[in-house]
Image (spheres, grey):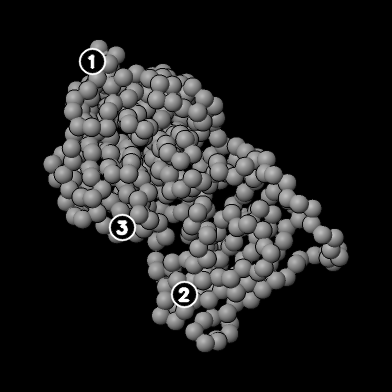
Amino acid sequence: MQFSGNFVLFVNQWSLHMNKLAIHLSFLLLAPSLWSQQEVMPLGALPDAVSETSGLIFYKGSVITHNDSGNTPLLFEIDTISLELTRTVTVDNVQNVDWEDMAQDDHFIYIGDFGNNLGTRTDLAIYRIAKSDYDSSDAVSAEQIYFSYEDQTDFTDNGNSDWDAEALFVLNDQLVILTKQWQANGTVAYAVPKTPGTYRARRLDSFNVQGLVTGATYHPETNLLYFVGYTTLLDAFIYRVEGCTEAHIFGGNVERLTADIGFSQVEAIGYVDTDSYLISSELFSSENPLIILPSTLYTLTTLDTISPNPEPEPAPEPQPEPEPGIIVENLLVYKPLGSDVLIYELPTEQPPLIARAIFDFSGRLLWYETGSDLENNSIDLSGLPNAIYSLALYFRDSKLTTSFAVY
């Protein structure tokens, strides 16, 4: 470690892996050659206050989540680096009968109070909160969107019902609900308007999920729908839907992705940017057999905006063949005195950056980012305690790493 002026300089090796189209770092695997491939990585356990997390959105750099049935009508803001609770907001004019998912558009946050395990509820609702109110106060009021399913005629308690629902997303000018069918093991999509009132939810489409749908998110820029859930054996799954329309949600290409989450009571998904999503799971415990699965936040990285067949680049000018082995370059990393920002300068003529991550000394992933934010070569470290960390920069066929200190 050298001190020069107002920055700390770190010099490290740039390892260029010759196995093109693959980068591997312990549990992190990126394979751009496989269009359907995606990466799911745990960011860590969520605070005890949201152990029953059931819905989430990513808004202004933080996770907003809530608990499910019987809990207080609170929204919890979580820092994505420290995973610490930073703020709570009370929705003061409604109850949390069974909040199950969240969605957002440019102006509003939507909360789905439509958990209905027994199929007996006649007070299903979606609550709409103005983002301007949320930004300015820790106590907000919600407008109500009440609905009933147009084809439900039987409200008898027959145990776990096909009229339960835990997934909500915004599609243009309508809200779409995906049911959680305990008996049929599928899902039905219903639509209601985004404006307050009382409605009959219109049936749009159905799909044989072979599992229980618990969360959904639709990205308006990529026009892609992702929804998550788990099987009756608690095996988590992720679906990607391309080409859904307001009339036919599952009318395009529907693909079940390989999710390396394992056994988990996955509850929610929300988009961060066009290639990054966050997924949360609820605390699950069982006495016989003894199983405890903590409430966890995961990051999902996709390749939705990276073309699977990029245009070929012009042939490079002939260059002398390098000696076999690791290519060494200098990576400049510095933290201005008194600042919580880490700045790095890449070697010249490096390939495009596709992701970056921070790991602690034990190798645990603390932070991961893709998308448009990579255009900025600075990283906010304000949520990290004093310690030694590792910065990893990922390119299409190479990886650049270095250590740095926060003190």
Discs 1/2, front: 2
Instruction: Count all numbered tags in the image, as a single digit.
Output: 3
Q: Which residue is mark 3?
A: 85
Type of residue at label 1? Thr
Mark 2: secondary structure: strand
Where residue 406 is drawn, which disc sits there?
Answer: 2
Depth check: 55 or 330 in front?
Answer: 330
Residue 72 in sight: no
Residue 320 in sight: yes
Place of residue 221 in the rendered image (x, y in percent of width and height, measured from the top left): 46, 41
- CA gap, disc 1 and disc 2: 59 Å
Left or right: 252, with 318 as reference point: left
Name the residue located 51 percent from the left edge and 46 percent from the top edge: 275
Mark 3: secondary structure: strand
Where residue 206 is drawn, which disc sits there?
Answer: none
Place of residue 342 in the rendered image (x, y in percent of width and height, measured from the top left): 49, 71
Depth check: 274 or 232 in front?
Answer: 274
Eyeballing the image, is 97 above or below 82? above
Q: Quadrant of residue 141?
A: top left
Where residue 156 is drawn, which disc sits there?
Answer: 1
Name the residue located 73 percent from the left edge and 58 percent from the top edge: 17
Mark 1: secondary structure: loop
Name the residue located 73 percent from the left edge and 46 percent from the top edge: 312
- CA gap, disc 1 and disc 3: 40 Å
User: Which numbered disc, 1 or 3, marks the residue that appears first in the sequence?
Assistant: 3
User: Which numbered disc, 1 or 2, marks the residue that appears first in the sequence?
Assistant: 1
Type of residue at label 2? Val
